[in-house]
Image (cartoon, grey):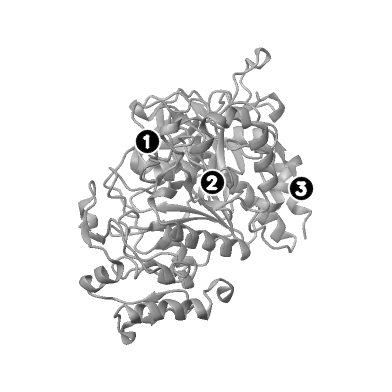
Amino acid sequence: MVSHFRPTSDTINNVLAWLNESGIPQESLNISQDRSHILFAPKVRDAELLLSTRYYEFHHTTQPNHGPRLAVQSYTISASVMDSIKFIEPTFPTPLGQKKTRSSLVHLQHKGEATASWNGTKVDCHKYVTPECLRMLYSIPFQGTGRHTNSSLGIFEISAQTWFPNDLDSFFSRFEPQLIGSRPTVRSIDGGYMQYNWTGFPFNSEPSLDFEYALALTDRQPVIELLVGNNSTTSPLGNMLAALDASYCNSQAGGDNGTIECGASAPPSVISISYGMSEADYPAGYLDQQCLEFLKLGLQGVSVVAGSGDWGVADQLSQCIDPATGLPADPGSGDSSSLWHFSSMFPASCPWVTAVGGTSLAAPLPNMTQPVWNQSAPFFPPQHAYLVPGDDGDRGNSTSGGGFSNVFAAPDYQTRDAASYLATQRSHIAPFANSFRADGRGYPDVALLAQNYLVVYNGGLYTIDGTSAATPLFASMVARINNERQNQGKKTVGFVNPVLYKHREIFDDVTEGANEGCGVEEAFRAAKGWDAVTGLGAPNFKRLSDVFMGLP
């Protein structure tokens, strides 16, 4: 597999010739074992001459303990190697995210609400979400055929994001008493650590949400916390990929203070990622390299699931793309969509990832006034595209992320659906048609409930919204299917998108609602078939399982 993705000998020789002509001594060059990277450590002055630039020290604005990072504002390379080089590091300062008030890799999570009113274990599923509500809504059985030893669900977390054992047990005592004492397995990657000094929503809500629901919905399968990074880590997603694939390590430019672990971790069968970043924050080659890693994982039988974001067509910091600079910028009070381009989210925009959007339940119908905790899925009202009125100042409404990648072209499995959607929506899209790449990879692929999840953290019971709730839900579904397949002697499903797009019977189509952002009050609408806000729709677990269990 490594040989399939590495550059050709001509490409390597072309870059070596350029470096030699530029005065970089051949003896200082080191070609990586997989022959995909050329590593060398020039003096700053030599690097500046090579790239016709000037290096500066960039400092993180809110986390000074991360230390300075060498980076440039722009650079130039010879036209002779333009087609041979994907990216050079260190160059731009963003993966560290110094341009922003926080790291550019951020939670795909809207917010925690006020403490939920709760009396006993019977919950009105029209108002709040529990694991039992999700089982009923999506036809997920309580138990399967037993745990297979090789099936697992991995959940990506960044250090300082911490769950507390008492919170897990408090949640389980209310809603899943048979799981009291259950814990995820913590796998430290590149110094990943649990910390208990900083508490509150920014530190405890995401892991509490992830593991309370993943442990409840995976039917006692191993749930692994992929806990990445120390205080110096600037690219935690890249560090995780390097730990899962030794051949990717060299793309991390030596790692963070030499701590990077090359191929030290076997990948779980499913990986859930509730974090994201704007494509515009990174060079296209850098994103392409990571996207290829997700393809490699899929070919190995690993399913990668990522949230589509919570701010519609804007990025996770509610920023859009300034067409004059191509960089993320705050749209401010402007209301003309022609001023802003849409900001697509990575890794959801990678064609080899299954991107998960969000839905909400419509208002209960008159005959649905009673709580449905003991009812079956047909008693639920329809789902529509997730949108919650905002109370976060100028960030606006929280709405399901979706749209089209500015970096990746639409994959073959999706081109027909994307073209059909754009054709049927032509008149609606016309006013902002120049704000996105119409031939880009469309996302999300699927959408699930993303509102009012009951979560215990810091001893309190809260509701949490966002696609970071929907993402581990779908990942848990895939993990359960893997477990059933392995119990029958079959392989894990791996990259699932081609199968999903061929089997529309899996989904309950979501045709109501829309997302918004970047000055557009109604951007991509939900519609019949695939759309750029709810994807193919909401999967029914039984139908999803029937399709994949029927495959070899």
Q: Is residue 418 above or below residue 117?
A: below
The mark closer to the camera, 2 or 1, is: 2
Q: Residues within 10 Å of mark 1 (few under 14, many from 20)?
A: few
Q: Quickly name the residue at label 1.
A: 459
The mark closer to the camera, 1 or 3, is: 3
Q: Is residue 433 above or below residue 159?
A: above
Q: Quickly name the residue at label 2.
A: 214
Give amino acid for label 2: Ala
Q: Secondary structure at mark 1?
A: loop
Residue 302 lies, in percent from the top left, at 59, 60
Q: Quadrant of the C terminus?
A: bottom right
Q: Secondary structure at mark 2?
A: helix
Q: Residues within 10 Å of mark 2 (few under 14, many from 20)?
A: many
Q: Residues within 10 Å of mark 3 (few under 14, many from 20)?
A: few
Instruction: Please report contact status of discs 2 and 1: CB closer than 8 Å, yes or no.
Output: no
Q: Quickly name the residue at label 3.
A: 546
Q: CA distance from mark 3 to mark 2?
A: 21 Å
Name which quarter of the figure residue 299 lies in: bottom right
Q: Earlier in the sequence, mark 2 or mark 1?
A: 2
Residue 164 lies, in percent from the top left, at 38, 45
Residue 548 lies, in percent from the top left, at 73, 52
Q: Is residue 179 above or below residue 373?
A: below
Instruction: Please report contact status of discs 1 and 3: CB closer than 8 Å, yes or no.
Output: no
Name which quarter of the figure residue 189 lies in: bottom left
Instruction: Please report contact status of discs 3 and 2: CB closer than 8 Å, yes or no.
Output: no
